Amino acid sequence: MSTTSKIDSDQAVAQRYAGAAQQREAALCCPVEYDRRLLECIPDEVIERDYGCGDPTPFVRPGDTVLDLGSGGGKLCFISAQMVGAQGRVIGVDCNPEMLRLARKHAPTVAERIGYANVEFRNGMIQDLQLDLDQLAGVLAEHPASDLASYHALRHATESIRSEHPLIESDSVDCILSNCVLNLVKVTDRRQLFAEMFRVLRVGGRVAISDIVSDETVPESLKNDPTLWSGCISGAFREDEFLNAFVEAGFHGIEIVKRQAEPWQTVEGIEFRSVTIMAYKGKQGPCLERNQAVIYRGPFSTVKDDDGHIYYRGERMAVCDKTFRLLQREPYAQMFDFVEPIESIPLDDAQPFACHRSARRHPRQSKGLDYDVTTEAPGDCGDECC
């Protein structure tokens, strides 16, 4: 099954998925249930050539700009097109020519059936979302690289494409989807892959990624098997390392929203299963003191966030303005109550907040030292307060 020689993982993936675009290969997908209503407008050929291990589309919202990494035949894009509506936009990125042809072939049919055209498919590598491969192909057609001078000219043209006409603009996407594709990227390119996802997301944007993970580190002997690699097996992230990759890229609110209980496959005692991960962009920025506090509701006695802040159940914890706003958004909002100071401190007057420590906030810090209000119990309140 395995070999000790190094494989060209990109070539193994390209060859296998080129064939899978022509004829269905059952070994490339896990059983996944999609909303059948959203499948009705999608041509059978697309559905038959779809390969994945999960369904991240429930996290798409009306009006979103959605980016599908490794869009293949376009199934997730066509599902998302209906979810975002006519005011939304969906972009699929893939570098497999056969898969791109399949997706582009059926895009007009889907547009006609749903009543609007809001999907496009772009040629690029998901670990390099700046380089438009169709533009690069045009440069090569006009100026083939045949010697050192033309090679250097090609490098210059490549950088110009990235900077002047990037495949995906920075801070332009609301939601990134991917279905069993990240594990096909070479290990050496994975840090760049996560950095690119972070780059193209808007502040407040989110990723919903379904992929195969392993419960143990995959040995080199399995990684060097082209069939296992291209089959979304031996390139799998170890489960904890997959989550940590989002942390290292700067994401927050990282959550396992679905985890397959039984492994999809087991190879040499190592279990491989599908997970779906949600993560968000938006915790970057200065930490400013505005006398705000949050109260963790429970059910745990304490929790710690990705920045090391500790929240004790039922206690007022001092937070900076950035964290105060962040915790009011998903996925945290239902976990906390929020205490604004009676006298708000303007942002321009706010001092730096020591975010490296976890401190309780005395109520007087929010109310003011001179706060001396006395109120009477309300009158007839019916059954609401008795």
Image (spheres, grey):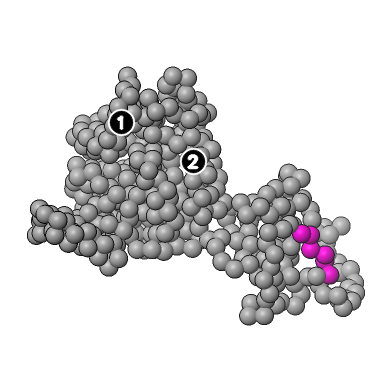
User: Is 348 or 111 nearer to us in this picture?
Assistant: 348
Q: Magenta: predominant secondary structure element?
A: loop
Q: Which residue is drawn at 70% across and 48% down?
A: 303
Contact between marks 1 and 2 (CB within 8 A): the answer is: no
Q: In this view, does 333 lie above or below 302?
A: below
- Estimate the x, y position of residue 104 in percent, counting from the top left: 21, 50
The residue at which mark 1 appears reads as: 6
Q: Is residue 185 above or below residue 378?
A: above
Mark found first going from the N terminus, 1 or 2: 1
Numbered label attached to residue 184: none
Q: Is residue 179 left or right of residue 294?
A: left
Q: Which residue is drawn at 36% across and 36% down?
A: 52
Q: In which quarter of the image is residue 44?
A: top left
Q: What element carries label 1?
A: loop
| Residue count near mark 1 (Cα–Cα under 10 Å), binned few <14, some 14–19, many ≥20 | few
Amino acid on which the number 2 mark rests in the picture: Phe
The residue at which mark 2 appears reads as: 242
- Estimate the x, y position of residue 222 in percent, counting from the top left: 38, 26
Q: Is residue 9 above or below residue 379?
A: above
| Quarter containing the N terminus | top left
User: Is 354 or 269 nearer to us in this picture?
Assistant: 354
Q: Distance between the residues labelled 1 and 2?
A: 23 Å
Q: What element carries label 2?
A: helix
| Residue count near mark 2 (Cα–Cα under 10 Å), binned few <14, some 14–19, many ≥20 | some
Residue 303 can be seen, yes or no? yes
Amino acid on which the number 1 mark rests in the picture: Lys
Residues shaded magenta: 359-364
Q: In which quarter of the image is residue 135?
A: bottom left
Q: Residue furthest front?
A: 148
